[in-house]
Structure formats: C-alpha cells, structure tokens
Image (cartoon, rainbow, N blue to C red):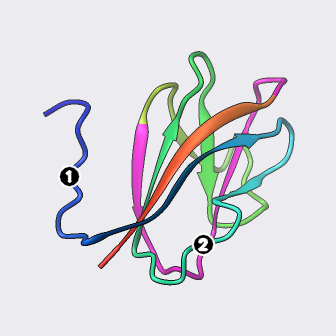
C-alpha cells in the first residue's frame, strides 16, 4: 500500500530522528550509526529538492542515489557503514531517518 513501510522482519527500532543537512557538503545520516543496525530508512522531508545518498563523503549530486522530494528509501547495510546525503538547494534541508535491527 502506498505510503506504508513494513517493519517486518525487524524486531527493534534502534533509533530515529530528523536531521538538518547543510547545503554544499555531504553529511553523515545519522551522525552515529546504531551498533545493531541492519536497515536504515531515509525520507526526504523537503518539498522541492532532491537529495542524493552515497557510501562516503565524496558523494555528489552527480554520483549519488537520488531520493525525490517527499520520498523514502530503504537501505540494508552493516551498522559500521555510514550513509552520506548531499543536495543543491542553496540552504539547509531536513531528512528523517530510522534505524532497524533484529
């Protein structure tokens, strides 16, 4: 169903928050990963700007995975692996994130 994300088979919401992402530089989201994280959900809360996600601080708006305005993406990964977000809005924007584990 549109707009819903299943939390199965995860048994724990490890952490969640909304985080400002400054313009012009890649920012780790979240700033510190939960040690038992298996999956992270990231939602672009901006109403006009696409964000771009990558595996390290070298991500750019040309190389990152795009997440359109208002859209959520799910990434399965190890706890030690950070995600970085960048955008070209010209001012800070906000993303929401949630870390899931077993």
Tell me whether circle 2 and circle 1 mark residues in contact (CB < 8 Å): no
When the figure is inspected, residue 36 is found, relative to residue 54, above or below; the finding is below
| C-alpha distance separating marks 2 and 1 | 21 Å
Determine whether, in the image, residue 94 is placed left or right of residue 57. left
Q: Secondary structure at mark 1?
A: loop
Question: Is 89 in front, or is 63?
Answer: 89
Determine whether, in the image, residue 42 is placed left or right of residue 93. left
Q: Is residue 76 magenta?
A: yes
Q: Position of residue 65 (x, y in %)?
A: 54, 48
Disc with the residue nearer the chain's start (2 vs 1): 1
Residue holding disc 2: 33
Residue at 47 percent of width and 26 percent of height: 70
Residue at 62 percent of width and 58 percent of height: 54
Circle on res. 6: 1
For the residue carrying disc 1, how many other residues have a C-alpha within 10 Å: few (<14), some (14-19), or many (20+)?
Answer: few
Q: Position of residue 43 (x, y in %)?
A: 48, 40
- Residue 94, image quadrant: top right
The boundaries of the magenta stretch are: 72-91
Q: Secondary structure at mark 2?
A: loop
Circle on res. 79: none
Classify the position of the N terminus by image quarter.
Answer: top left
Q: Position of residue 98 (x, y in %)?
A: 46, 55
For the residue carrying disc 2, how many other residues have a C-alpha within 10 Å: few (<14), some (14-19), or many (20+)?
Answer: some
Q: Residue furthest top?
A: 48
When the figure is inspected, residue 5 is found, relative to residue 67, above or below; the finding is below
Q: Position of residue 18 (x, y in %)?
A: 60, 43
């Amino acid at each position: 169903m549109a707009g819903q994300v299943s939390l199965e088979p995860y048994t724990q919401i490890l952490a969640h928050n909304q985080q400002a992402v400054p313009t012009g530089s890649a920012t780790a989201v979240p700033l510190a990963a939960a040690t038992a994280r298996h999956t992270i959900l990231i939602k672009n809360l901006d109403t006009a700007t696409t964000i771009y996600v990558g595996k390290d601080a070298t991500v750019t708006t040309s190389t990152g995975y795009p997440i359109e305005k208002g859209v959520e993406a799910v990434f399965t990964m190890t706890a030690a692996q950070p995600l970085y977000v960048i955008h070209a809005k010209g001012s800070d924007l906000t993303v929401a994130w949630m870390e899931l584990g077993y």
